[in-house]
Image (cartoon, rainbow, N blue to C red):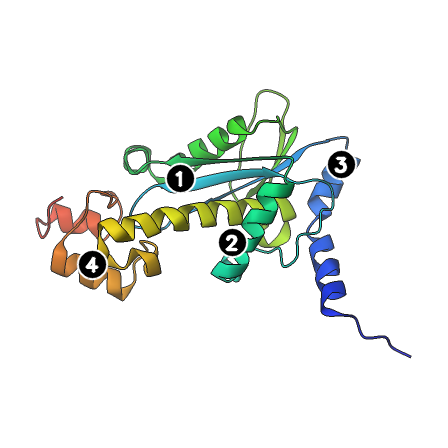
């Protein structure tokens, strides 16, 4: 006789699989594994947020997943649970000026290193979503493609970064209500492009990101 699993049992099994990389690190002798991820990398406006999280071994966080797969309500609930349960947590802002000066890739690297340094407890192992980090102080790092969907620590970091940045964009939406930032989060939606055409750019638009860059170069709009 087959016994049907409950939704909670199925979710527990799914979340347990997200700790494969963390368990591998522990078996190799590493005690504190941090996951790192960002939010807002592809946005046309505002700071990017990079978060780092160290979770207790095999902690069950219901519905834990890549932040992009979750509803805002579930993300907020998980954010509170992560903050309450994490061994260590940090988040840093990477400013528009830094993004425009360094380029988005280098700015992301800088933010990830700063997020690790900002953790109140030093990790000895770091998991990242695709980005490759190198440390000179004995910290081992591993880059995982689609890591935010495969690693519990990276998923937790993606949620912290996403919720933190969404709260920032809600503030920008009040300052610049014409652009719909509370909905598009600064990404290149039709609503956002229409607002640019009608109202121009804001001081928080990234000048090196198209179409902002090209429209400035052609003199169509100025900041």
Whether pointer 2 and pointer 3 mark residues with C-beta atoms closer than 8 Å, the reply is no
Front tag of 2 and 3: 2
Q: CA distance from mark 4 to mark 1?
A: 29 Å
Residue 40 in view in this figure: no
Q: Secondary structure at mark 1?
A: helix
Question: Of all residues shown, which one is farthest toward the left?
Answer: 219
Label whose residue precedes the other's in the sequence (4 or 3): 3
The image shows residue 113 at horizontal and vertical percentages of: 49, 30
Front tag of 4 and 3: 4
Residue 178's disc number: 4
Residue 76's disc number: 2
* Quadrant of res 12: bottom right
Residue 14 in view in this figure: yes
Residue ID at (25%, 64%): 191
Left or right: residue 191 compared with residue 223: right
Using the image as rendered, state which of residue 209 and residue 171 is in the foreground: 171
Q: Label 1, on which residue?
A: 105
Residue 197's disc number: none
Whether pointer 4 and pointer 2 mark residues with C-beta atoms closer than 8 Å, the reply is no
121 is higher (above) or lower (below) than 65: above
Question: Of all residues shown, which one is farthest toward the bottom?
Answer: 1
Residue ID at (20%, 58%): 178
């Amino acid at each position: 006789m087959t016994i049907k699993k409950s939704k909670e049992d199925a979710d527990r099994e799914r979340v347990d699989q997200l700790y494969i990389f963390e368990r591998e690190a522990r078996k190799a002798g590493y005690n504190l594994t941090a996951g790192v991820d960002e939010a807002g990398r592809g946005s046309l406006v505002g700071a990017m947020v990079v978060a780092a999280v160290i979770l207790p071994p095999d902690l069950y966080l219901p519905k834990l997943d890549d932040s992009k797969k979750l509803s805002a309500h579930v993300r907020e609930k998980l954010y509170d649970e992560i903050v309450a349960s994490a061994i260590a947590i940090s988040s840093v802002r990477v400013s528009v000026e830094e993004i425009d000066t360094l380029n988005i890739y280098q700015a992301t690297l800088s933010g990830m290193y700063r997020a690790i340094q900002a953790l109140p407890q030093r990790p000895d192992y770091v998991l990242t979503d695709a980005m490759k980090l190198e440390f000179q102080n004995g910290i081992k790092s591993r880059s995982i493609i689609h890591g935010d969907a495969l690693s519990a620590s990276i998923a937790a970091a993606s949620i912290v970064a996403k919720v933190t940045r969404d709260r920032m964009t809600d503030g920008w939406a009040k300052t610049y209500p014409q652009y719909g930032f509370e909905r598009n989060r600064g990404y290149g939606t039709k609503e956002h492009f229409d607002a640019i055409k009608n109202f121009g750019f804001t001081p928080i638009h990234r000048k090196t990101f198209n179409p902002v860059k090209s429209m400035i170069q052609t003199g169509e709009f100025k900041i």
